[in-house]
Every structure is written in C-alpha cells, then in structure tokens.
Image (cartoon, rainbow, N blue to C red):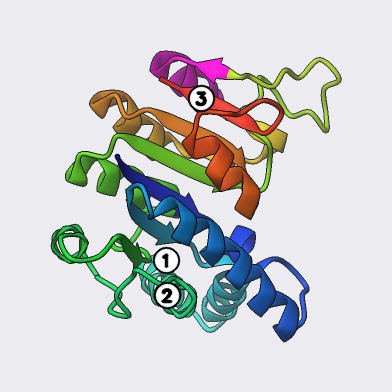
C-alpha cells in the first residue's frame, strides 16, 4: 500500500522540550515510520511547528510580506524533514522539493521525507496534493487532537467527535470552521477539497508514534476520524 503521512512540526518536535527530549521524540516517530515502511511505501510531509512560527513572527515584525514568510516556513519544514531523515532507516537523506522528485526517490526507497512546496499551502494541503499525485491508497493526518469534532469541545459540551465522515460531511464541517478543538489546523479547507475530489481515504488522528501504526490499520477508536 502507498501511504502519505502529514506530520505537523509541533507533533514531531513537541513544545518546550529539551534537546534530549526532542531527539528521543524524533527517534520514537522514526521507529513507527520504520515499522510501517516494512510493509508499505511511505511518503512523510513534515511541518514547521514552533520554530517556523517564531521565525515567521520575527519576519513579519521586520516587514516581510506573507509570501516571503511562506518561503521561510517552507525552508524550516525541510530542516525538520532532514532531522527526521537521520533516524529513518529506509529514507534518502535528500529532501525533495517537488512531488516529481519525491515519486522518483520512492522507486528506490521505502520512505521519502519532505517539507513544504508551495507558498500559501499548509502541511495538510501539501500532503493531500502529494497523495493525489502519487496515487496514495491512504492519507494519514497526525494532529494535536483526537479527530474531527462537530464543534469546539472547549466551548461546547455538546461537541461530538466523529469516528467516521464522508468527504462531503468533512467539507461541510471545515467550511463552517468548526473543526477539532476549535482549531482550523486539524485539516484545512484546501486539503479537504483535494481529498474529496480524489476520494482519498483519510484518517485524522491524535499524532503519537503508536497511533500512526493504529491509524494505518484503520483502528481509530478513541484516537481519530476516518474520512471516506
């Protein structure tokens, strides 16, 4: 099976951790990726996380426009991918800058790691486009929350976490801006529309090393939402 994993920078690197803790966290994610790659071809799109936010915030204060900030963020996602590549056994240490290069690398490697590609595109949108381009069977979206909600559970006691959604239902929820834990970052509208148009089976789940393996098997009980 061909799988694309969207791995947010904050999910991978954590927040407020020591250098040793970050290294241990990267190794734990790499172990799950290594295990998954024994049976599948895997593409991993890594986000920028806290470091990207800090650089982009400083760049804005210095007068940078949003496109410049996007390019800066893209470079940081690639640095994060380079770091993860050191711990992933079956991946090249070359980080591709476009989908064609990623597909070519996958011919000789079980895992291909990459960062962002286009200004204005989130990690999720990049991963969805990559999944479409390579004809992925499954898109895994590792996030900081445990799936897609009907409303912000921090604001509404009636918020419901979905175990399963159709592509159309996902679009409706995302369009209302009512996605998991009140954050539009769970999955954005562009990514949702790409998933819908290509009918890519997608799992949005709480991003831990263990949950990556569970999500790949379709086991989302208590950890995520399946979209198909």
Q: Quadrant of residue 135?
A: top left
Q: Secondary structure at mark 1?
A: helix
Whether residue 100 is visible here, answered yes or no, is yes
Q: Is most of the magenta stretch helix, strand or loop?
A: helix
Residue 132 x, y percent position in the rendering: 23, 39
Sequence-earlier tag: 3 or 1: 1
Foreground mark, 1 or 2, reads 2
Callout 3: 10 Å neighbours few (<14), some, many (20+)? many
Badge 2 is on which residue? 85
In percent of the image, x 34 and y 66: which residue is there?
A: 114
Q: Identify the disc placed on residue 226.
A: 3
Residue 174 among those drawn in magenta: yes
In percent of the image, x 59 and y 71: which residue is there?
A: 27
Q: Identify the disc placed on residue 218.
A: none
Badge 1 is on which residue? 66
Callout 1: 10 Å neighbours few (<14), some, many (20+)? some
């Amino acid at each position: 099976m061909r799988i694309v994993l969207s791995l947010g920078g904050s999910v991978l690197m954590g927040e407020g951790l020591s250098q040793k803790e970050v290294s241990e966290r990267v190794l734990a994610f790499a172990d799950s990726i290594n295990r998954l790659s024994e049976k599948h071809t895997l593409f991993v799109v890594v986000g920028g996380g806290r470091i990207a936010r800090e650089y982009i915030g400083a760049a804005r204060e210095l007068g940078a426009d949003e496109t410049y900030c996007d390019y800066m963020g893209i470079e940081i996602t690639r640095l994060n991918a380079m770091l993860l590549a050191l711990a992933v056994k079956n991946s090249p240490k070359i980080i591709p800058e476009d989908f064609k290069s990623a597909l070519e690398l996958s011919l000789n490697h079980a895992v291909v790691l990459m960062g962002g590609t286009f200004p204005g595109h989130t990690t999720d949108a990049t991963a969805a486009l990559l999944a479409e381009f390579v004809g992925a069977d499954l898109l895994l979206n590792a996030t900081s929350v445990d799936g897609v909600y009907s409303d912000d559970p921090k604001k509404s006691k009636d918020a419901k976490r979905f175990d399963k959604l159709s592509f159309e239902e996902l679009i409706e929820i995302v369009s209302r801006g009512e996605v998991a834990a009140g954050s539009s970052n769970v999955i954005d509208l562009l990514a949702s529309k790409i998933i819908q148009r290509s009918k890519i089976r997608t799992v949005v789940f709480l991003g831990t090393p263990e949950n990556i393996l569970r999500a790949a098997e379709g086991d989302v009980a208590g950890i995520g939402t399946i979209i198909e």
